[in-house]
Image (cartoon, helix red, strand yellow):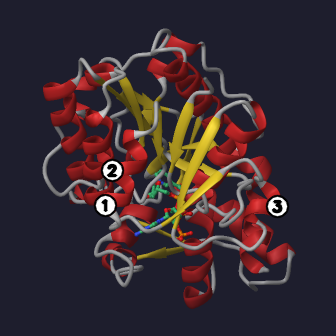
Amino acid sequence: MAPKLFVTGGTGYIGGTVLDTIVKSHPEYDITVLLRTIPADFSKRYPDVHIINGDYDSTDIITEAASKADVVVYNGNSDHLPPLQAIVAGLLKRSNTPSFLIHLSGTGIVADWRTPTYLGKLNPKIWNDVDDIDAITSRPEGELHQHTDTYLHEVVAKHGDKLKVAIICPPDIYGPGRGPGRTQSVYFPVFWKEIQKVGQPFYAGEGTNTRSWVHIEDLMTVYMKLIEAAVAGGKGADWGREGYYFTASQEASQIDIARETGKILKAKGRIENAEPKQLPLDTVGSMLSDLYPGLGAYMFAANSRTQAHRAKNVFGYEPKEATLWDTMEADLLACLE
Ligand SMILES: NC(=O)c1ccc[n+]([C@@H]2O[C@H](COP(=O)([O-])OP(=O)(O)OC[C@H]3O[C@@H](n4cnc5c(N)ncnc54)[C@H](OP(=O)(O)O)[C@@H]3O)[C@@H](O)[C@H]2O)c1
């Protein structure tokens, strides 16, 4: 029998690339996707993928689909609890166990955006998903993705014998997506939006605050290793309490990103002054607050430094794609279109 996968977020940047990668790597898998908006060419592109029409609050539909799946790959929204609860309810109904859930979180969980100490400055703390696993899985309330991560840690403590959970926790992601919907990541579109208001690229404080990054295709390497391990019954991967995977391949400071962005945008005639501008912390902190209060501080002034030790130990993960600096021009040009 073909392994049955239930995939969400298939029109998203990450989830769309995950879906495309699974279909191309494993045409033998029996895949069902949950879509709230079905792209016009979806069935032409993926003729063998079954579609369930619904959103993340269609919890009965999600539970039913999860109860029929060997593996669920949940690709965000990483902060919405009801679909995760519905998936867990469905997977726990299965008599054929263990079942597998691969969840998408993000390194906002360890970012220092809520404390002023290192905003606009380099924080020396680098999080390691093996040595720091206890601290990463007990982050305080209010951190990004904390409530969904915590819910899954509780599920693992209670049902870890029959439900194997892995959490993929990427840093900022760059490079073009390959899915049927959104193909751009988050950072450059929102940076460009704010640059247009300021008139030039910017940073806060010293601008040495640093975050980790990964190319979307390197992230797919970790996804596929986990999905293939789940389909094979779980061997060759860590699940449950230890099943937490950072995926970072490199770091970049805000001031270095602003400098490079300035050069590219000036060369394209989109700004006059390529020099990054220093802005007060509270100006940067109030940016993007229509999307999420504090998002400006998180995106442009915070540190979030992570290393992918577990994926290296368990899968021999060696990121090999082009660097952030190599792809920055293409990522920025995609925002200008
Ligand atoms: N991109 C990054 O750099 C990054 C890094 C680390 C973590 N993350 C986290 O990963 C998650 C996904 O990121 P992304 O960049 O792939 O986002 P995205 O492109 O916006 O994709 C989100 C996906 O979830 C679907 N979705 C959202 N709300 C839904 C709902 N209520 N019902 C049904 N479907 C819904 C979207 O469907 P529609 O197409 O119908 O809207 C889309 O398929 C986010 O929560 C983000 O915080 C992102």
Name the residue beneath numbered marker 3.
Answer: 44
Q: Which badge, 1 or 3, is on the more N-terminal residue?
A: 3
Look at the numbered disc 3 and give the secondary structure of its residue: helix
Q: Position of residue 283 (x, y in %)?
A: 37, 81
Residue type at numbered disc 2: Thr
Q: Which mark is residue 63?
A: 2
Q: Is mark 3 within 8 Å of ligand 1?
A: no
Look at the numbered disc 1 and give the secondary structure of its residue: helix
Q: Position of residue 327 (x, y in %)?
A: 77, 52
Residue type at numbered disc 3: Lys
Q: CA distance from mark 2 to mark 3?
A: 27 Å
Tags 2 and 1 in contact by the CB under 8 Å rule? yes
Figure check: 198 above or below 123: below
Q: Is mark 1 within 8 Å of ligand 1?
A: no
Density class for disc 2 (Cα within 10 Å; few <14, some 14-19, many ≥20) is: many
Name the residue beneath numbered marker 1.
Answer: 59
Q: Position of residue 269 (x, y in %)?
A: 84, 83
Look at the numbered disc 2 and give the secondary structure of its residue: helix
| Image point (58%, 61%), residue name | 12
| Image point (23%, 60%), residue name | 114
Q: Position of residue 8 (x, y in %)?
A: 50, 53
Q: Which badge, 2 or 3, is on the more N-terminal residue?
A: 3
**Is 286 displayed left or right of 11 in the figure?**
left
Q: Residue 272 sits in which quadrant?
A: bottom right
Question: For this rendering, which residue is in front, 165 or 201?
Answer: 165
Density class for disc 1 (Cα within 10 Å; few <14, some 14-19, many ≥20) is: some
Question: For this rendering, which residue is in front, 34 or 265?
Answer: 34
| Image point (47%, 15%), residue name | 233
**Residue 184 in view in this figure:** yes
Q: CA distance from mark 1 to mark 3?
A: 28 Å
**Residue 304 in view in this figure:** no
Q: Residue 227 sits in which quadrant?
A: top right
